[in-house]
Amino acid sequence: MPIDMIKRALLAGIGMALKTKDEVEELAKEYITKSELSEYEGKKFVDDLLKRYDEAKDKLEEKVEKSVKNFLKKSDIATKTDLEKLKKEIQELKKRS
């Protein structure tokens, strides 16, 4: 089985952002053993897979953060930044009194 085919199958079959890095690495090692890849091919495969895992995780984190910010904005809920601004304004008003 060519390594590209294994990569595609593995990447398509794993909810990469939902797995831990250790789980992804362990699964990759199982595929390497089953497909009898050389040590070099195996290392390259694991490195590539972990790189893709990190990229997928970062993208998911960005999407979640953006979604939460949009929700807060639409819900008209004060954020930590909003509260800090109010606190500063109150402190400045107290100083003026």
Image: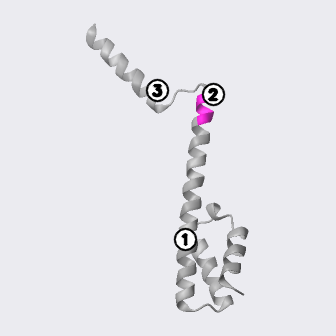
Left or right, 95 with reference to 54: left
Using residue 6 as the reference point, say whether residue 57 is left or right of it: left
Q: Quadrant of the C terminus?
A: top left
The quadrant in which residue 8 appears is bottom right
Which residue bears the numbered disc 1? 50
Name the residue furthest top: 97
Q: Secondary structure at mark 2?
A: helix
Q: Which residue is mark 3?
A: 82
User: Relative to 17, is 72 above or below?
Assistant: above
Mark 2 — residue?
75
* Image coordinates for residue 75, horizontal then vertical, percent: 63, 27
Mark 2 crowd level (few <14, some 14–19, many ≥20, 10 Å Cα): few
Q: CA distance from mark 3 to mark 1?
A: 38 Å
| Separation of residues labelled 2 and 1 (CA atoms) | 37 Å
- Return the disc, 3 or 2, that comes first in the chain's sequence: 2
User: How many neighbours does mark 3 have within 10 angstroms: few (below 14), some (14-19), or many (20 or more)?
Assistant: few
Residue 42 lies in what quarter of the image? Answer: bottom right
The residues colored magenta run: 70-74
What amino acid is labelled 2 in the image? Ser
Give the mark toward the camera: 3 or 1: 1
Callout 3 amino acid: Asp
Looking at the image, tell me whether mark 3 or mark 1 is earlier in sequence order. Answer: 1
State yes or no: discs 3 and 1 in contact (Cβ < 8 Å): no
Relative vertical location of residue 21 with respect to residue 43 in this rendering, above or below:
above
